[in-house]
Amino acid sequence: MVMGPMSGPNVSIFKRFQDHWQSIDQSQFESGASHPDVCPLLDPVDKAWFESTLINCKSLRDDYRELLELTLIFLGQVPPRGVRFLAPGPMHNARWMSKGIYSLKVWMFRGQFKLTAREEKGLRQIAIFVSCLYAKAWTLAPEAVAAPRHDLQLLKDLTMYMNNVNEDVGRAVLNKLQGHLWYLSEELVALALFDPLVRVEDKRKILTSLHTKEGEKYPVKRPKLLPSQSITGLGLQDMASTNTRRFFQKLRLEEGFLDADPATWLELEDYQTAAAFVQRIAVINDHAERGVALIQEYNRKLTRDEDQLQFLLQNVSQHRKEFPDTRKMTIVAGLAAKEEKEHQDG
């Protein structure tokens, strides 16, 4: 929306910046905090969270770390590893995070890179959105049990962003988010029962809804977004109903603990077993996005033929079925099965 249509995997402005990178003096950058119109919009951002996450989260992937470090620099802070800028990497439409990284970087070096007024405004709007909302929300997104809480909080934060920062961007993201509210559905809101940061009293409210609030006969997979003025008053209990039990039934999880008080759940074996299971659930498609970006980048080096791309994807999929992990016993068993099949076919 703010940058206009994108005609291919590489947004032209980012490709231009990548080609211009060797001419950039990395010591001459301008943070958002130094801009008179941007600085006031950044005041509410919890800058300490970014610093704490960069220090304490040892398993943070490199691209996530770069996003958080750039955000801190944009906010006028110094990351734990100091101020530094990595050379621009691959850019792909399947990876929105790379757009955020590029937007922050290009805007902070706008004094050394020619931009039109429209480009500067668009990049500024993206950089503000990334710093105020996206960077933190995306970093926290992989936490399965926290997905309902995070999604509900993001709805509330977007409402405030729309009212106080940028109505057009806030409304556009709210409309987009409406198609991704799986974890606020009547069934998947059950994940919140295993979230240690959901208060016991709030879990009791969810339980009350689970026991007494009649669910839809045909519950939707994604709840419809309510009018923005009512979002701020929503709680997780408003998403739960008698249909929430289906979560446990579909995953074949014991649900006896649902009849006990949440204050005692940590002591119950069935709760502990269920909690260990749900914490391993993958709730984002990040791996799929990375896979698509990698295979398309690889394919472009070999051929631009779509049939060849599909052939490669099918072969990778088949290989993963035959060799689901890299253990020696798995590889030996997979090769033996493959030889046996070839022998039978021959």
Image: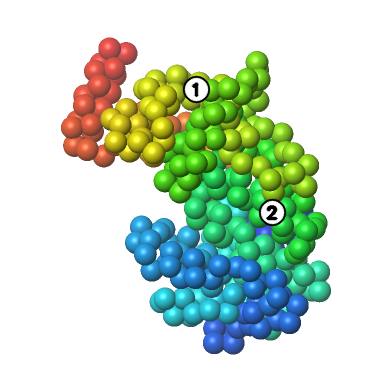
The amino acid beneath tag 2 is: Leu
Which image quarter holds the C terminus? top left
Q: Residue 224 carries which label?
A: none
* Placement of 242 over or under 149, stated as above or below: above
Q: Answer yes or no: do the residues labelled 1 and 2 have beta carbons within 8 Å?
A: no
Q: In which quarter of the image is residue 248?
A: top left
Q: Is mark 2 on a helix, strand or loop?
A: helix
Real-space Cα separation, disc 1 to disc 2, in angstroms: 30 Å
Q: Judge left or right: residue 290 versus residue 215.
A: left
- Residue underneath mark 2: 158
The amino acid beneath tag 1 is: Arg
Residue 60 in the image: x percent, y percent?
Answer: 40, 59
- Residue underneath mark 1: 245
* Residue occupying the point 49% across, 70% down: 48
| Residue 256 seen from this side | yes
Residue neighbourhood size for the residue with mark 2, other residues' Cα within 10 Å, grouped as few (<14), some (14–19), many (≥20): many
Residue neighbourhood size for the residue with mark 1, other residues' Cα within 10 Å, grouped as few (<14), some (14–19), many (≥20): some
* Placement of 158 over or under 85, stated as above or below: above
* Residue occupying the point 60% across, 68% down: 45
User: For this rendering, which residue is in front, 43 or 6?
Assistant: 43
* Placement of 322 over or under 81, stated as above or below: above
Q: Earlier in the sequence, mark 1 or mark 2?
A: 2
Q: Is mark 1 on a helix, strand or loop?
A: helix
| Residue 127 seen from this side | no
